[in-house]
Structures are given as C-alpha cells and as structure tokens.
Amino acid sequence: MFKPKFTITPKILDSLSQIAEIKGMVHKSSLLPTREAFLRQSAIIKMAHTSTSIEGNTLTEHQVKDVAQGKPVLAENRQVVEVENYLAALKKVDQISLDKSELNAHDILLLHKIVISKLVDRSKTGIFRPGQVYVVNVLPDRQEKIVYTPPLSSQVPILIQDLIDWLKISGSLHPIIRAGLLHYQFETIHPFTDGNGRVGRLLTLLYLYQSGWDFRKILVLEDYYNQNRKNYYQALQTGANYAKRENADLTNWLEYFTEGFLEETKKVRDQITILNTVGEKGLIQNILSVDELKIVDFVLTLGRITSDDVVAILAVPKRTAQSKLKHLEVLKILKKKGAGPATFYSLIKF
C-alpha cells in the first residue's frame, strides 16, 4: 500500500491554520444566490483555462468563456475540444461529489474518458495504459530528454487501488494533506497514455469536494500551478523513476501544495469581500487594491474604521490613510460619519 514519507513542518501547519480560518469565513459569508452563482461560473472558466494551459493549450480565458457559452472561437479544433472536454469533466466532478462520498477506480476512468474524448483513439479512452510511457522534456534543440519513468503498466491497476484504499484509512491526516498526496501519487503512477495532468487535478478537486473542503466550489488551485509551471513540475519531480519516488521525502511537495492552497483561498476570501461590497463590477473591473481590501475587511469585521486604524494596519502615513479612505468614499463603498477627531467610516450596504 501507498506509504508516503513526509514531515508536517511549521510552514505547513501555518498554512493549514490560515486556510482553516479562511474556510470558516467563506462558509459563514452571506452571499446572494446570484452572486454565488457568478463566482462559481467564474471559477469553472478559470479552472478550464488554467488546467488546459498547463498542458500547452493557448486559448485565452475569454475564449474559454466563449466556448463555455457555446460561442464560436477562432482556434485549432483540438484546443477547443480540450476545453470542451474539461468543462464537461468539471460538471461530472460536481455530480460525483453530490452522489458519492468516496473515490473509486470507476470514477477515475470515467473522468479520463471525458477529458480525452475525441483527442485520441476511442480504444485508449477510459482505460489504464496498456504499455510503458515516459515523461519527457523537449530541449531547446528539440531533442527529447526522459525526466521520469513511471511504473510498468501491469502495476497501474494495483497501484491505483492501493492509493484509493490508502485514502480510506488515512482519516487522521488533514484533508488538504491527503489531497496533496493524492495529487502527487496519481501523477507518479501516471496511469494513462495521455491526460494524466488534467485527470490528476480533477481528482484532487473531487476529493476536496467529497471531503468538505470545497470553499463553496470557487477555489481554483490550478491557477497557482499555472503561474509558474516550472515550479509545479519541479515540486512533483522527486525521482527519475517510480522506484526512487517510492522512498522520496514528500515534505517539499506538501509545503508547495499547502502554500499554493493558501494563496488561492485568499483569492476566494477577497472575491467574496468584493462581491459583498461593490458587487460583480468589482470583480470585473478590479476596483479594489490589496490595501483597500484590507480596509474593507477591517470594516466588515469591526463595523467601522478610522484613519488611525488605517495607519496601524497598513503602516502608512496618516495623509495616505486619509487618501485611501477618501477614495473608498468616492467609490461609494464607505460613508463618512462624525467630524474632526471623532470621524470614522462605515460600510455602505450594497
């Protein structure tokens, strides 16, 4: 059975603590159904864009949105099909998470069949690879260099079942740690001829949904991986072949995974803050800066804020603090109350 080796470092613990705090805030937030649907749809588009981008798809996020809406897109047919498939797979992930509380091999094969449909011969969809494959890097001179050799194809069904069984008995581990190890081990097994990256990220998402760490299904982990693909692949690369990876220390991978998870949960928190203050236009137009989000979050927590509060939380001069408050007043996000030393600002209910 899968026996991962790792250490829960202070860095990992700190990330998990902050993630849990944000999770509580996200699930307690009052979001109108239409606004939650807006965030959910935006997340679906971003997931499809970033996950396929990691694999080399060149469609822009706007084009992915057009594909999702059934609009024609001027691009290679294969790239459009990749996005269509991923969008369909995301729907299936959502459905499976509502129907089942545990992962099984059938779900994995089904997601692969959806992801790779019309891209390879039908006989290769929804089945584990029948032969050996290699992970290669294309060098500047277009030569291919083997960077990882997965296990023999005969071992794949056994290793996948071992991974599923491990998930069932690893309940003492934090769900995010289990999700990170699932992601790692799936890519290490490399069970398919093609589509391993996309299916692996979908399985991670599915497991988080089934574990109750879905962040209202607006979390986009793929965005973190796509920001620096080299770092993503380097974090996964712990050995040149399966035998070496079996004994690898996965602490660095888990630090990378939890750090990225935290970064993306902060984005979720900020999106909800913006929606609850200025509505959808805030997300579309990127109205609020990072400093302004901190000010709004402070007001949401305590109900009011003064220029002295802004000086303290942002470490800026008082004149700058007053300027930032004035800008939020102009945007009709905050309203000024009182006068002189008693002046404070509160949130305008949107």
Image (cartoon, rainbow, N blue to C red):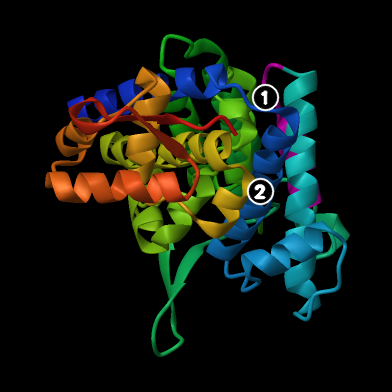
Q: What element carries label 1?
A: loop
Q: Is residue 106 magenta?
A: yes
Q: x%, y% of residue 168? A: 57, 14
Query: Which kind of residue does numbered mark 2 sit on?
Result: Ser
Q: Is residue 230 above or below residue 29?
A: below
Residue 68 is marked as none
State the residue in front, 52 or 69. Answer: 69
Q: Residue at x 37, y 63 (%)?
A: 230
Which residue occupies the foreground of this view, 238 or 94?
A: 94
Residue 112 placed where, x, y %? 74, 47
In the picture provided, is 89 more to the left or to the right than 147?
right
| Residue at the front extreme, as displayed | 339
Which residue has dot 1 on it?
A: 103
The boundaries of the magenta stretch are 101-114
| Amino acid found under the numbered disc labelled 1 | Leu
| In front: label 2 or label 1 | 2
Q: Residues within 10 Å of mark 1 (few under 14, many from 20)?
A: some
Residue occupied by mark 2: 42
| Tag 2 secondary structure | helix
